[in-house]
Image (tube, rainbow, N blue to C red):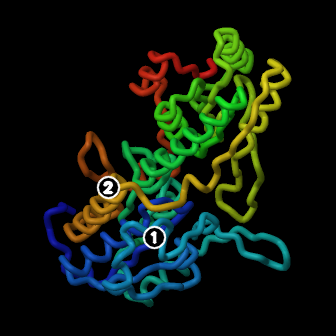
Amino acid sequence: MPYNVLMPTIKRIGVLTGGGDCPGLNAVIRAVTKTAMHIYGLEVYGIEDGFLGLIQNRMRPLSWNDVSNILTLGGTILGTSNQANPQHFALDRGGKIAWTDVTDRVYDHLRANEIDAVVCIGGDGTMTGAANLINHGINCIGVPKTIDNDLEGCERTFGFETAVHTASECLDKIHTTAMSHHRVMVVEVMGRNAGWLALHTGVASGSDIILMPEIPYDLDKVCEVLHKRSRAGKRFSIMCVSEGSKPKGGDVVVLRRVETSPDPIRLGGIANKLVADIEAATKLEARATILGHIQRGGSPTPGDRVLATMFGYHALDLLMHGAEGQLVVLSGGKLGAVPIESVAGKQRTVPLDDPLVLAARAVGTDFGD
């Protein structure tokens, strides 16, 4: 269907935030809701806790006042969940987990609430869930969210800039204590299987070594760089490390497993492993800092507020002009759209020849390879 035909049949939409929380979610909720009301005269229902709200039929009308004064607010007023995929939902059956497809239940709840389409704000997991709904006749429009910046087809997701800003501020503070105590400071950032957050934070903070999933590290090479700096009179070193980093021929460090989640692996702890390995190999004093969920919190930067507002507006513009199953994307600096099904289950990783990788190498940053 061409996107230039206004869709008068759409009267009520739902909006949900899925997966991990992220600065800018409320800015998107605000933009979606106010555009729907102000431009198209639609009713908007907020779906609580992502897909879990669809499964449990927890939805409520949103008013203009509900979404006012939330542009700068971190988190999400609707709540979120990263343990609810309608196609693969954990049900407790006599103390045992039974994985069940409850998509029909979601369909019935949406029809009962007379919701004609759903704006799904989330990352690759949320888009995988949305793709399933689309296959069952539910129109979903996706808005790309993740501090990891790893959504296929989109060069920048909202929340990423804020996370880089937050992590870089933390690295700046760690820099001063590293100087004072003459230590190797290993700072672990999020990112899962993509190194965008580590790369941008590492460059922004002037880290001496950046480790990320796309470039498996050689511990001997890392220690050689640290020794070389020490011999040159550099009495401290800063390492920015992605949680998904792994040694050559080795594997990632798994913090824990959440068996009720569609994606049960939780990464974390690579910084602690590196500190132990570095101290054993070099006798240099090292400390680990894991930034954790601080990267997902706080007020979004002005850049993320603007991007989130544009994404939310564009989602409604697409929907009301005939789009079905599309994800809003930023590509070549311009807003566009790609089919949600084309990005479901995929992750955008850092190319080895990314311009920022090349620039970092040019100024002497090491990647452990």
Expressed as whole percent of the image width and height from the top left, the position of residue 349 reads 50, 37
Labelled disc at residue 307: 2
Q: The N terminus lies in which quarter of the figure? A: bottom left
Q: Looking at the rendered structure, which numbered label has been put on residue 241?
A: none
In percent of the image, x 40 and y 88: which residue is there?
A: 61
Residue 273 shown left or right of residue 140 in the figure: right
Task: Specify the quadrant that holds the C terminus.
Answer: top right
Query: For residue 228, which quarter of the picture?
Result: top right
Cα distance in 3D space between marks 2 and 1: 30 Å
| 100 vs 42: above or below | above
- Residue at 70 percent of width and 51 percent of height: 266
Residue drawn 59% across the image and 68% down it: 81
Lower position in the chain sequence, tag 2 or tag 1: 1
Tell me the mark number nearer the camera, choosing from 2 and 1.
2
Q: Give percent across and percent down for residue 334.
A: 24, 46
Question: For the point 42% across and 58% down, which residue is it?
Answer: 300
Q: Residues within 10 Å of mark 1 (few under 14, many from 20)?
A: few
Residue 186 percent location from the top left of the image: 68, 34
State whether residue 21 appears in this view: yes
Q: Nearer the viewer, residue 190 or 8?
A: 190
Query: Which residue occupies the extreme front position in the image?
Result: 180
The residue that label 1 is drawn on is: 136
Q: Amino acid at mark 2?
A: Leu
